[in-house]
Image: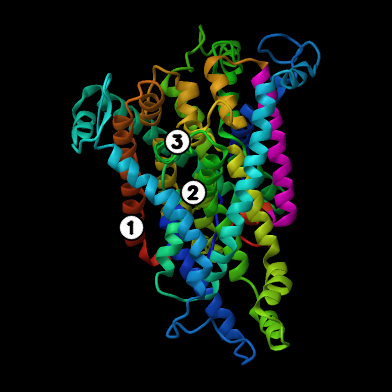
Amino acid sequence: MNRNGPLALIFTALFLMFLLAPLLVVCAVAFTSQGYLSLPTEGLSLRWFRAIGDNPEFVRAFKDSLLLGTVSSTFAVLVAVPAALAIARHRFFGREAMQALFLSPLMVPHIVLGIAFLRFFTMIGLGGTFAGLVLSHVIIILPFALRLILAASTGMDRAVENAAASLGASSWTCFRRVTLPLILPGVASGWVLAFINSFDEVTMTVFIASPETTTLPVRLFLYIQDNIDPLVAAVSTVLIFLTVAAMLVLDRLYGLERLLVGRGRE
Amino acid sequence: MKGKMTVTSPAHVASNKTTVVGAEQAKGGTRGAKPSPASPPIRPSRQWSWIPYLLSLPGIAVCAAFLLVPLAATALLSLNSFSFYGGIADVWKLDNYIDTLTDSYFHEIFLRTFRIAALVTLSCAALGTPQAYILRRMGAPWRSLCLLIVLGPLLISVVSRTLGWALLLGPTGLVNQGLLALGLVSQPVEFMYTETGVVIALVHVLVPFMVLSVWASLQRLDPQVENAALSLGASPTTVLRRIVFPQIMPGILSGSIIVFALAASAFATPAIIGGRRLKVAATLTYDEFLNTLNWPLGAAVAMLLLVANIVIIVGCNRLVERRYKQVFE
């Protein structure tokens, strides 16, 4: 049922247009056949997508971003699974404080984290290294991984686990064969969400990335500060399409509406 | 909305209390519904066990070593002094804070940061609240689609989205072309490198958080109350004003806290749309760190930003929770 009047629908149309316009413009400009910024009015062309391949800096940053996202979200999930199980099924001293600690990176502005890591990594000799990037990304994506894994472990039926244990399964077998498969959707979507957040991060990474190891959004940001041309539009289009692809995966795994709005399928 | 999880929002840390309570209640609920001896409740708290500590040890170690220590190091750094020739000196003074808080150059930047954040928050509330309400009244397939379009951009890189606005708002961009074609303006409006441009782009980046927050509070609303008011002869406007609005107010307020905090510390959008001249607190920190190399001063600005952020998030959340206690319970 739709109980909205025409005015409400016009408002919605304008609102959605406002949200989609910048994304559509970026994608449209990327297909221009001209050598300058313009809408593709005189035929579509893929020349700017081919130009990405001729620009080794973007290609390398893209590879670094993929590797960084993969390594850091795997690391974050490995840390988050045991922590989530502890929080979900034990009542212990310091439980709330620990959960607050794990979620606290969400409260610190990324710009502050950026300079904190720059200072800290310079002090301990990790400045400009890939290891430094991984560690800093683990910190900022841990809350996202934890939230989804925590939700999966809290909603889990413990009876199956108890059945396995009473049938003689060791606690490791029990975890591997019963618990893990049951919370796997939460773990997998936690990983994907962590990956997206790592892949898109720019504010913090711009401080700790070095010219040798940098991420695609940082590369893009620094390039845009100097000049805006169809090349950056093409790179952004690739980014947008990859994110949409990841969103489709998340939708399959977890349900996007549930992920974004925090509510089960009706 | 018990046990809600939301994708990206700092203020949800503060409102996390309700989440934990929700999870516990859900557990208590299943326990109460199935009192079979086969499914024992959560481990009793009286019996001390080292298992949870062992399980969460990796997380605690990572967070302590790579979050708390760096932040503490930055706080200490902000007390050091800096000279152009001597570099960073190991002294412990509050000079950087005094400089930052008394200099009119910094006043202007902080004032601009808060002005932009306030404008962005107001615009997000004005646009996001009615949109969330309209979404709730939509039919099944359309609602999911619209919600996806509204919330999906949250996952897309801020740089890509801001680039879109840089293309749209330029002197020959589509917005100016449209305004000229409609005859609304006689010459292109300057959006790039102005506060207006930064506000427009930031509203685009942050409005999904507002929709999300209002949507969450709308979910708690019982439609029967609205129907009761209508059947008692209230006009739709009265229902909106007297029934719906007071109940979603906490949602609007907590959405505003998130949006304000994120707008005040936003970096990429003001850096691209505002350029180097129109500085805000975050871009100032960046310049002090990477161009002027005055790390102690940059650290002081960042610490002020961090403290302001935490005070706003925690303080406002407390206020909202106290003021609207009955709504949260």
Q: Position of residue B140 (x, y in %)?
A: 71, 54
Q: Amino acid at mark 3?
A: Ser
Q: Disc 3 on helix, strand or loop? A: helix
- Quadrant of the rendered image containing residue B108: top left
Outermost bottom residue: B37
Chain of residue at mark 3: B
Above or below B24: residue B146: above
Stretch in magenta: A231-255
Q: Are marks 2 and 3 in contact (CB under 8 Å)?
A: no
Q: Mark 3 highlights which residue?
A: B123
Chain of residue at mark 1: B
Residue at 27% over, 26% down: B106
Residue at 62% over, 49% down: A73
Q: Amino acid at mark 2?
A: Ser
- For marks 1 and 2, give the one nearer the viewer: 2
The circle drawn on residue B318 is 1
For marks 2 and 3, give the CA distance.
Answer: 18 Å
Q: Quadrant of the N terminus of chain A?
A: bottom right
Mark earlier in primary sequence (2, 3): 2
* Mark 2 on the same chain as mark 3: yes
Query: Dot 3, crowdedness within 10 Å: few (<14), some or many (≥20)?
Result: some
For marks 3 and 1, give the CA distance.
Answer: 24 Å
Q: Disc 1 on helix, strand or loop? A: helix
Q: Are marks 1 and 2 in contact (CB under 8 Å)?
A: no
Outermost top residue: B187
Query: Dot 1, crowdedness within 10 Å: few (<14), some or many (≥20)?
Result: some
B250 in magenta: no
Q: Mark 2 highlights which residue?
A: B9
Chain of residue at mark 2: B
